[in-house]
Image (cartoon, rainbow, N blue to C red):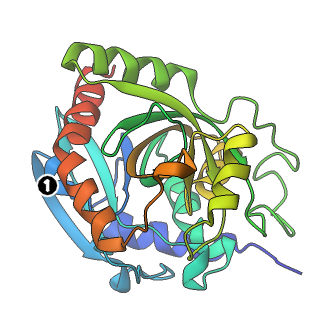
Amino acid sequence: MTIHNEETWAQTAAYLFERGIKTVDFALVLGTGLSATHILTDIGLEIPYSDIPGFPVSTVDGHDGVLSYGTLAGKKILVLRGRFHYYEGYEMQEITFYVHVLALLKAKVLFITNAAGGLNPHFKGGDLVLVTDHINLFSAHPLRGQWPEGLGPRFPDLMHAYSAKWQKKLQISALELEIDLKKGVYLGWQGPSLETPAEYKMARNLGADLVGMSTVPEVIVAKFRGLDVAVVSVVSNVCFPISILTETTIEEVISVMQQSAPKLAKLITRVITNAN
């Protein structure tokens, strides 16, 4: 039976607090190929994940595995440069470990970015897509097991998993910056193999606009712990219609993400700067 350990989360949070992370106005998770230097105007602290007690370590290309802490427009921002994936061999409780730590650090807002395959035929490579909902096809659930009493609802309702408030703010900022921010539903499953043509077709038939191998577990736990969540995907490769499908490499995904990074950074910077 899986038993979730509050003591380990508390030890990690205490370590980060002692290192100087005492206030977190916004937390930001960077997906494949993205950099904190695009967001933070002043980086005061950087800690490799391997130095943080209890923290998993990123093992995938394009994920630095470093926590950055700094400021933007007078707000304290905690940036996770790289995430953890089920396909790396981590359990769901390890993948979402950092969300519990954020909750203990009293973070209220979590911005998540990711690279995703585009299933909507109106999407093209490099597009930014505001995630409005998800379809969970992971084989395990991050809330499975026994939970400390009073930590969160045993059966959390995910009808509003993605914050309407922050979706609106992102859309307004995109208009101000003349960024074409599309909207879509994200389907998550475990990977690491990319999907077959038949699987792409199935995902599209299920109503997905995007497909990826992350994000969903983190969103579930963030909602469970009471954080507001907003997610922006970068379309790293076009997966639909099947007639135009081509093979994709991780190098191509990273390249698209790096090209889109300045645009995504502008959007997030504007939202945080205007936040009150």
Dividing the picture into quadrants, the one containing residue 2 is: bottom right
Residue for point 40% across, 73% down: 15
Dividing the picture into quadrants, the one containing residue 205 is: top right
Q: Say above or below: 155 vs 30.
A: above
Say which element carries label 1: helix
Q: Position of residue 246 (x, y in %)?
A: 43, 62
Q: Image quadrant for the C terminus? A: top left
Number of numbered discs: 1
Q: Position of residue 61 (x, y in %)?
A: 32, 78
Give whichever of 8, 249 is nearer the camera: 249
Q: Image quadrant for the N terminus? A: bottom right
- Residue corresponding to mark 1: 37
Can I make out residue 52 in this image? Answer: yes
Q: Amino acid at mark 1?
A: Thr
Residue for point 43% across, 27% down: 182
Give whichever of 18, 52 is nearer the camera: 52
Q: Position of residue 232 (x, y in %)?
A: 42, 40
Q: How many neighbours does mark 1 have within 10 angstroms: few (below 14), some (14-19), or many (20 or more)?
A: few
Residue extending furthest toward the front: 243
Q: Say above or below: 9 vs 38.
A: below
- Apparent side of residue 170 relative to residue 163 in the rendered image (left or right): left
Residue for point 26% across, 24% down: 179
Give whichever of 3, 213 is nearer the camera: 213
Dividing the picture into quadrants, the one containing residue 157 is: top right
Can I make out residue 67 in this image? Answer: no
Q: Say above or below: 83 vs 8.
A: above
Residue for point 27% across, 55% down: 257
Give whichever of 19, 83 is nearer the camera: 83
Q: Position of residue 41 (x, y in %)?
A: 10, 45
